[in-house]
Amino acid sequence: MQNKPFVWAHRGSRARAPENTLEAFSRAELEGADGIELDVRLSKEGEVVVMHDPSLLRTTGVDLLVKDLSLAQMKAIDPSIPSLEEVMRECGGAMHFNVELKTEALTPLSDVRRLAGSVADLFKRYGCSETCMVSAFDPRALDSFKDMCPDHRGGWLLKPRLFPLWTFPGKPRHFDAIHPHFSMVGPCFMRQARSSGKAVNVWTVNSSILSRLLMGLGAQGIITDHPLL
């Protein structure tokens, strides 16, 4: 059994960031996080933007879609909105990146592939095969990314259910890891995940007791809002 899980710091889903996004990521490193989990979408001109929601409404009060705005237009509304490249440039080095590819149910496959391809291009440019991975709820996004970057890890995100899912949901294609909600993880789930050769990184774990429990079950990674658990 491992002594300490890999800790990913995630702040992307908060209603309003308490500080500049880049400052929040830098602070995560000071708090002891091993890596940063962040959400990305494509802007109108194809820039990879760090943004959880499809629109700016919840975080800025402006009801406009990310896909309809250029990065410059978004920065005019909120200067703290960074591109993925800015984050990699400012927070790279020792920090690892877990980049969630955000899509909607009706996102066309062509747009899914554009997003995956843009992130793949950045990863190749920065040569970060050991420190960068992607994750997504949409298997199409992971398939597209792995076609372009087979040497980079991909994690399949699993949503919580009305009732906990205690069994592993099958062996997904060529994904390297499973990223379940903590409510889905139990001994049977972990045994089956290990037998399928999949790493397990659990989200969003904001309790030290739960973190220790998951560590005891064999989770390799913890995604949390609070790296100082």
Image (tube, grey):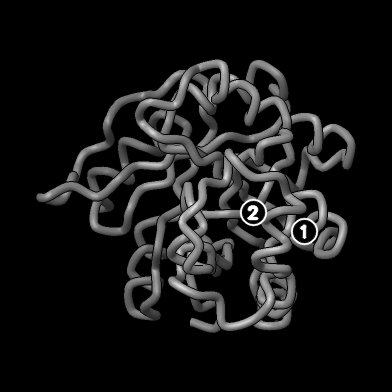
Asked if residue 1 shows in the view, the reply is: no
Tally of numbered discs: 2
Name the residue rendered at 50%, 41% in the picture: 102
Residue found 57% across the figure and 46% down from its top: 66
Crowding near the residue tagged with mark 1, few <14, some 14–19, many ≥20 C-alpha atoms within 10 Å: many
Residue 50's label in the rendered image is 2
Query: Looking at the picture, how far across and down is residue 30, in whole percent?
Result: 72, 82
Amino acid type assigned to the residue bearing label 1 in the image: Val
Q: Is residue 94 left or right of residue 164?
A: right
Q: Is residue 132 above or below residue 125?
A: below
Camera-side residue of 122 and 20: 20
Q: Which residue is mark 1?
A: 87
- State yes or no: discs 2 and 1 in contact (Cβ < 8 Å): yes
Residue 151 visible in image: yes
- Disc 2 or 1, which lies upstream in sequence? 2
From the viewer's perspective, is residue 111 above or below residue 69? Answer: above
Is residue 33 positioned above or below 127 on the image? below
